[in-house]
Image: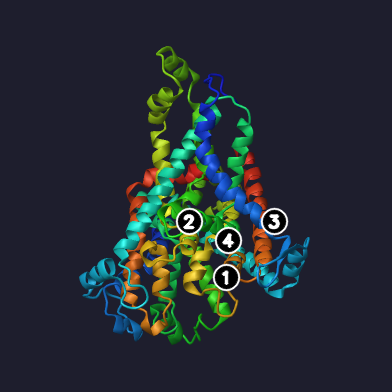
């Protein structure tokens, strides 16, 4: 696709793209390239000499059980967050899609958590569920649950998943509602006339017609869980107790913070880069399909 | 529809209010906690109703800060966040709209390569290049500065794509008409294209402002001085001390203050927000 009416100028277009190009090259490509180069090098303990070691950093990484655990954990978190948040948001969107009085008010009251920053989400949830002073913990203890996410790794993981899913409800709700409203009413009416009860209508009509939105949101939620949970984890558990809430992004951050192995940290970055490329690729292929749907 | 909708409608209202309650509860607790006495909270005796320390706590939070961990007034942190958020939002829009203009309205060597170079940055979020980027910013002496906070985040493939898409839909006649009026490329951009892009720019601004205000990982890395902290980083440092010393009412007041601007933007500019969100995800 190209415009027919254009301007003639030799220098102006370059001047116009220059600022963006400069920032992209200095702050995006150069560091990314550094990470790739660094991931093939091994630095001695004093940072005095470096040797080219091919894929040694990667091989070592995959031999490290801690890294393998972080991969599994990240995927587990992603799916748990995506599925719990998506299903709750879908329920709310289906309810809000009905012709109800005050539906605009409902929408407003459900979408604002989108604006809450991940570290704040972490603070809110750890305060509610703090073992000694949380208001919800009181009831959990009264119900006989031995609740202490600061000591119990599984409880800490559950807490992260809950908080991260909570934040994502509003985003998913908004896109589900838009998806539902795009389905022509006549389809539901036809199904109703054929005698399909509401539950059946949902599973045989709404759900299949909504599948592009569901798939799109699944990818977006997984990307969110990969990257944006960093703030939640950092304010809530700092990856602990032990390493039970360390995700891939958190590991790159904390390994680098300790000033440890530069090559390994770079290799971790490159692996993350590949994952983003794959996820973005999936997202774009799908968006192309949606256009011609 | 055919069946009796009465009961179903009540069920829908009921489920929606439960949803709203779940979504609002953590924030309600934060607001309540920010009006109470720290000793009560620390004992696990926090009341579920607002206390009487509202003015006292918020005054201390905004103008003084905590007495323990960081002695930085939260008012100052909010100012830092505001500068960063505005710089990111305005910067992204400005550099994206002019690059989209160049790519759509001019033919020049490497036009498409430049487009792809910008596009691929979508796949390089800051999380995958944390330390190398940190090193470059350090080498450029931009640690602890507004430039360091904003500049590395200012490129935007999404915004460039969005403006490119929009420019493609602008009828060619407009350009021909302004050319007949004797307007050059810059005049056409300023007098015709910018006014037409107003709604797009506003929708994008709402989203980018929220995104900028909520930045966390990057400011966490490059700010070491307390007076350069953004509010998101500041709140984390407030709960670093051992639990017994955390001043929870102040932490919660900070959480409320950190939420206030972006939530206000979402609620007050809901139409633009929804539009921006849907468009940037396409």
**Disc marking residue B141:** 2
In the rendered view, would you say B282 is above or below B244?
Answer: above
B186, A211: nearer the viewer: B186
User: Which image quarter holds the C terminus of chain B?
Assistant: top right
**At which x and y percent is residue A290?**
61, 40
Q: Which residue is mark 3?
A: A37
Q: Are marks 2 and 3 on the same chain?
A: no
The alpha-carbon separation of the residues under discs 4 and 3 comes to 13 Å
The alpha-carbon separation of the residues under discs 1 and 2 comes to 23 Å
Q: Chain of mark 4?
A: B
Q: Which residue is mark 4?
A: B131
Extreme residue toward the top, this view: B180
Q: Quadrant of residue B17?
A: bottom left
Label 1 Cα crowd, 10 Å radius (few <14 / some 14-19 / many 20+): some
The alpha-carbon separation of the residues under discs 2 and 3 comes to 23 Å
Q: Are marks 1 and 3 on the same chain?
A: yes
Residue A146 visible to an observer of this rendering: yes
Q: Are marks 1 and 2 on the same chain?
A: no
Label 4 Cα crowd, 10 Å radius (few <14 / some 14-19 / many 20+): many
**A242 relative position to B268: left or right:** right
Q: Which residue is mark 1?
A: A254
């Amino acid at each position: 696709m190209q415009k027919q009416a254009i301007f003639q100028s030799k220098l102006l277009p370059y001047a116009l793209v220059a600022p963006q190009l400069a920032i992209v090259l200095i702050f995006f490509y150069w560091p990314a390239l550094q990470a790739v180069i660094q991931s093939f090098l091994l630095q001695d303990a004093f940072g005095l000499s470096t040797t080219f070691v091919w894929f040694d950093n990667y091989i070592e990484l995959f031999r490290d059980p801690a890294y393998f655990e972080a991969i599994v954990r990240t995927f587990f978190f992603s799916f748990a967050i995506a599925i719990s948040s998506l299903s709750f948001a879908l329920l709310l969107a289906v309810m809000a899609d009905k012709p109800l009085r005050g539906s605009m008010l409902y929408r407003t009251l459900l979408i604002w958590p989108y604006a809450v920053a991940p570290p704040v989400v972490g603070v809110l949830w750890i305060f509610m569920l703090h073992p000694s002073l949380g208001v919800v913990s009181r009831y959990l203890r009264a119900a006989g649950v031995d609740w202490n996410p600061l000591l119990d790794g599984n409880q800490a993981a559950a807490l992260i998943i809950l908080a991260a899913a909570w934040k994502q409800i509003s985003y998913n709700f908004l896109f589900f509602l838009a998806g539902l409203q795009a389905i022509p009413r006549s389809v539901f009416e036809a199904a109703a006339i054929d005698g399909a009860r509401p539950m059946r209508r949902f599973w045989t009509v709404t759900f299949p017609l909504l599948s592009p939105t569901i798939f799109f949101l699944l990818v977006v939620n997984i990307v969110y869980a990969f990257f944006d949970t960093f703030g939640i984890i950092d304010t809530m558990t700092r990856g602990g107790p032990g390493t039970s809430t360390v995700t891939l992004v958190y590991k790159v951050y904390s390994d680098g913070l300790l000033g440890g192995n530069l090559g390994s940290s770079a290799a971790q970055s490159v692996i993350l880069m590949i994952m983003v490329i794959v996820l973005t690729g999936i997202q774009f292929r799908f968006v192309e399909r949606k256009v011609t749907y | 529809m055919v069946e009796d909708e009465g009961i179903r409608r009540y069920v829908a209202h009921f489920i929606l209010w439960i949803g709203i309650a779940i979504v609002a509860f953590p924030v309600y607790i934060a607001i309540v906690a920010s009006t109470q006495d720290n000793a009560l909270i620390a004992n696990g005796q926090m009341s579920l109703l607002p206390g009487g320390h509202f003015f006292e706590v918020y005054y201390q939070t905004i103008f003084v800060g905590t007495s323990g961990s960081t002695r930085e007034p939260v008012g100052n942190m909010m100012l830092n966040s505001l500068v960063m958020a505005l710089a990111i939002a305005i910067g992204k829009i400005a550099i994206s709209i002019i690059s989209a203009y160049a790519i759509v309205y001019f033919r020049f060597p490497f036009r498409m390569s430049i487009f792809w170079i910008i596009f691929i940055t979508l796949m390089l979020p800051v999380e995958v290049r944390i330390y190398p980027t940190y090193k470059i910013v350090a080498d450029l002496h931009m640690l602890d500065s507004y430039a360091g906070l904003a500049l590395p985040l200012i490129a935007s493939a999404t915004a460039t794509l969005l403006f490119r898409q929009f420019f493609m839909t602008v009828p060619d006649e407009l350009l021909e008409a302004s050319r007949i009026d004797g307007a050059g490329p810059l005049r056409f951009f300023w007098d015709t294209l910018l006014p037409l892009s107003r709604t797009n720019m506003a929708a994008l601004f709402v989203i980018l402002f929220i995104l900028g205000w909520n930045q966390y990982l990057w400011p966490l890395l490059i700010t070491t001085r307390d007076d350069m902290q953004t509010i998101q980083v500041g709140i984390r440092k407030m709960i670093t001390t051992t639990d017994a010393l955390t001043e929870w009412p102040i932490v919660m007041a900070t959480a409320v203050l950190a939420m206030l601007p972006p939530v206000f933007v979402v609620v007050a500019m809901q139409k633009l927000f929804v539009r921006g969100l849907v468009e940037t995800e396409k």
